[in-house]
Image (spheres, grey):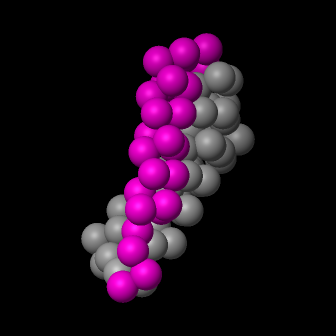
Amino acid sequence: MSEYHGVDWAAMCLTFTAIYLLGSKRRAGFVIMMAGNLLWCAIGAWADSYAMVIANLGFLAMNLRGFAKWSATNQ
């Protein structure tokens, strides 16, 4: 098991799932990606990588914006 107790694997799986859903034009992809972003932030904090934390907080904000702007016709 990795030093991150599988959180890194969960974050990776969520990220790939979200990319697949967004590629299939599914709004749920934004929610899944935000969960992945939070896990990547946790890993970044665990690894003392402030760049990873800041980047994923930025990605989280962009995904929140995408979720909010998604029109009802695209669901």
Residue 4 location (% of width, % of height): 66, 35
Residue 66 colored in magenta in the image: yes
Q: Is residue 34 visible?
A: yes
Residue nearest the observer in this picture, 42 or 28:
28
In percent of width and height, residue 26 lies at 40, 77
| Residue at 45 percent of width and 51 percent of height | 65
What is the tally of numbered marks visible in this picture? Answer: 0
Residue situated furthest left in the rendering: 23
Please, is residue 14 above or below residue 58 in the view?
below
Q: Is residue 55 magenta?
A: yes
Instruction: Give the magenta-colored segment's residue range.
Output: 47-73
| Position of residue 9 measured from the top left corner of the image (x, y, whole percent) | 56, 50
Q: Quadrant of residue 74?
A: bottom left
Q: Is residue 6 above or below residue 55?
A: below
Q: Nearer the viewer, residue 24 or 62?
A: 62
**Percent from the top left, x then y, of residue 15?**
45, 55
- Identify which residue is drawn at 36% across, 85% down: 73
Q: Quadrant of residue 38?
A: top right
For the point 47% across and 62% down, the residue is: 67
**Residue 8 can be seen, yes or no:** no
